[in-house]
Amino acid sequence: MTADRHNVVVALSGGVDSSVAAALLLESGCNVQGVFMITCEQGRRAQAEAEEVARRLGLQLTVLDLCDDFAQILGYFFDEYAKARTPNPCVMCNRLVKFGKLWDFARQAQAEYLATGHYAKVLQRDGAVGLYEGADPAKDQSYALSMIRRDVLAHVLLPMGEHSKDQTRQIARRLALGTEAKAESQEICFIPDDDYVALLERRHPELIRQGQIVDCSGKVLGTHQGIHRFTIGQRRGLRVAMGKPYYVIGLDAGSNTVILGPKEEVMHRRLTAGEVNWLIEPPQSAFSATVKIRYNDRGKPATVHPVGRLAEVEFDKPNMAITPGQLAVFYVDEGRLRRVAGAGWIERADD
């Protein structure tokens, strides 16, 4: 999708991806302004970097304090762990804050589009707008964008979708943006030092509660200090010696129990996903798809059965560590492209 001479608001983080996205839009002839969002105290550290990028590009920059709005993401994050589910706060933030509150701001600023530095594509094909995988499979972020509302998607620009990370750094160097050498953050923005356990226990000490570690027959294998320390498919850090690899195959919040088993017991053929967000016309019958069940998953062949707001997914072969609370994203092939048909939150896995 092109946006020549259109009014565009670009979410600037101070990093290389968003700075290059803004520069490319300027080069294409867009009228561009920047917005920097503060979602938590850690986020304030990057404000000066975003301001420097805006200065180099000659952009007006608005700083929005969205900490109150982001509080619902924090609440969701903590609540999911208390329910023995593994949350995905980045996906939720993209839906509610980045492509929710920032799109509200963009509309108020009379902009037709909101742009970010995400590595994915928004394309118009056959008169319809769709979300597609980015050109660089190693950087593709379509999974994390799959819960954006369909009506908002038509107003989203993702200039980085055609580029690799190396190409992005080369562009930043060519344009003297000062961001080409910035290290890539691997952390969730509101978790200091990427230590989510410490944050959970500091804010919710009631989660520190001793419980049993058992196998699928109920045999006690050991004890733990809180189910929030575990996730489905986890192998390391179990502190249980079994003579062969054991994995977390279940978490029971009601009884505060961690259930372990061998690899074959963490393999499942089916899952149920809820609160499905369709980015195509909602299908009325089953369809073939490649389904990803976590961010760094390349996906597995499956059949998706829409059932109201739910989707039942049956994989061609058993899939490992289907994790309640994570997202199942359904991709369909369109020639050489893979399009996001929809996505839903994993509720349960079945054999």
Image: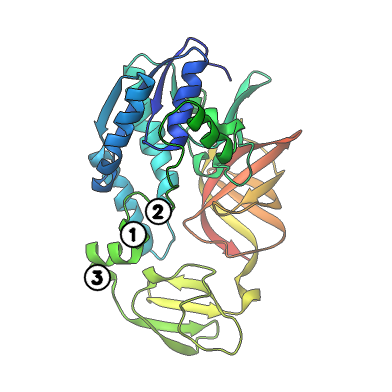
Q: How many marks?
A: 3
State the CA–CA distance, disc 3 to disc 1.
Answer: 22 Å
State the CA–CA distance, disc 2 to disc 3.
Answer: 25 Å
Give the SS element for disc 2. Answer: loop
State the CA–CA distance, disc 1 to disc 2.
Answer: 7 Å
Residue at image point 57% right, 44% down: 139
Q: Is 87 situated left or right of 71 in this image? A: right
> At which x and y percent is residue 75?
29, 52
* Above-or-below relation of 77 to 109: below
Q: Residue tagged by mark 3?
A: 206
Q: Residue tagged by mark 2?
A: 187
| 74 vs 163, nearest the viewer | 163
Q: Quadrant of residue 294?
A: bottom right
Residue at image point 32% right, 16% down: 109
Q: Residue tagged by mark 1?
A: 193
Mark 2 and mark 3 lie on one chain; the one further toward the N terminus is 2
Q: Are marks 1 and 2 in contact (CB under 8 Å)?
A: yes
Are there few (<14), some (14-19), or many (20+) residues within 10 Å of tag 1? few
Q: Is 275 situated left or right of 2 in this image? A: left
Q: Residue furthest top?
A: 5
Amino acid carrying label 2: it is: Glu
Give the SS element for disc 3. Answer: helix
> At which x and y percent is residue 244?
61, 85
